[in-house]
Image (tube, rainbow, N blue to C red):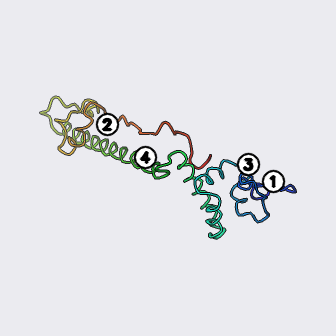
Amino acid sequence: MKEGGRKQGAMAPCAACKLLRRRCAQDCVFAPYFPADEPQKFASVHKVFGASNVNKMLQELPEHQRGDAVSSMVYEANARVRDPVYGCVGAISSLQQQVDVLQTQLALAQAEVVHMRSMRQVSTTSSDHHHHHKSLPSASNSSSENLSPSSTRLLSSQTTKSLFTMDMVVDQANMGESLWSC
C-alpha cells in the first residue's frame, strides 16, 4: 500500500473522494489522511465540518501539522455525533467531574489514614485508655466522635461507608468506545 491508502498501479480513491463521488487526483489533500479502508473517518468529519471547510483547513496548514489537525477533527466530529450539543466539551466536563470526585475520595482516605496513625500513636503512648489496643482501628469502626474537626468535616457525607471503598464514577454507556475511531 502506498501512502494515503492507494494501491500500487490501480488508483483507488481515498475515502473522501469516494464519499464525494469525485475522481481522486494524485495530489488530493484528503488522501494521506482519509484512506479508502476507513470511510467512516471522513464521513463523520464531513458531516460535522463539511468537505469544503476541511479542505480549506488542511490547505492552510503546513503539511507537518495536517495529521494532528485531522486527528483533532476526527475526535471532535465523533464527539459531536455522540453529543450534538456539547461535543468533546461534554466529554471533558464529564472527565473533570470524575477527577473532582476521585480527588475528594482520595482526600477523605488520606484524612482517615492520618487519623488512624494518630490514634495508633495515642494508643501506644497512653496506658490509661483501655479501649485502644496496639493495633489500628478498622476503617469501618472509626466514628466521627474520635476524629479531628477537619476529619469530621471530610467524613460527614460518608459516615456509613468505609473510605477505603473507592467508587469509580464511570460513564458505563460509552465505556470502551473511543472518540478517536469510528
Which residue position holds label 2? 163
Give the image location of residue 86, x and y in percent.
46, 50
Give the image location of residue 27, x and y in percent.
76, 66
Mark 1 vs mark 4, foreground winner is 1
Q: Residue at 25% of width from left, 29% of height from top? A: 141
Q: Secondary structure at mark 3?
A: loop
Distance from disc 3 to disc 2, alpha carbons, whole Å, reads 49 Å
Distance from disc 4 to disc 3, alpha carbons, whole Å, reads 32 Å
Asked if residue 96 lies left or right of residue 136, the reply is: right
Q: Which badge, 2 or 4, is on the more N-terminal residue?
A: 4
Which residue position holds label 3? 37
Three-letter residue code for mark 2 = Leu
Distance from disc 1 to disc 4, alpha carbons, whole Å, reads 41 Å
Distance from disc 2 to disc 4, alpha carbons, whole Å, reads 23 Å
Distance from disc 3 to disc 1, alpha carbons, whole Å, reads 10 Å
Three-letter residue code for mark 4 = Ser
Q: Which badge, 3 or 1, is on the more N-terminal residue?
A: 1
- Mark 3 residue crowding within 10 angstroms, few (<14) / some (14–19) / many (20+): few
- Mark 4 residue crowding within 10 angstroms, few (<14) / some (14–19) / many (20+): some
Q: Residue furthest right?
A: 9
Distance from disc 2 to disc 1, alpha carbons, whole Å, reads 59 Å
Quick check: 25 above or below 79? below
Q: Which badge, 3 or 2, is on the more N-terminal residue?
A: 3
Q: Secondary structure at mark 4?
A: helix
Q: Residue at 78% of width from left, 55% of height from top? A: 13
Give the image location of residue 143, x and y in percent.
21, 33
Which residue position holds label 1? 12
Q: Residue at 81% of width from left, 54% of height from top? A: 12
Which residue position holds label 4? 94
Q: Nearer the viewer, residue 63 or 85?
A: 85
Three-letter residue code for mark 1 = Ala
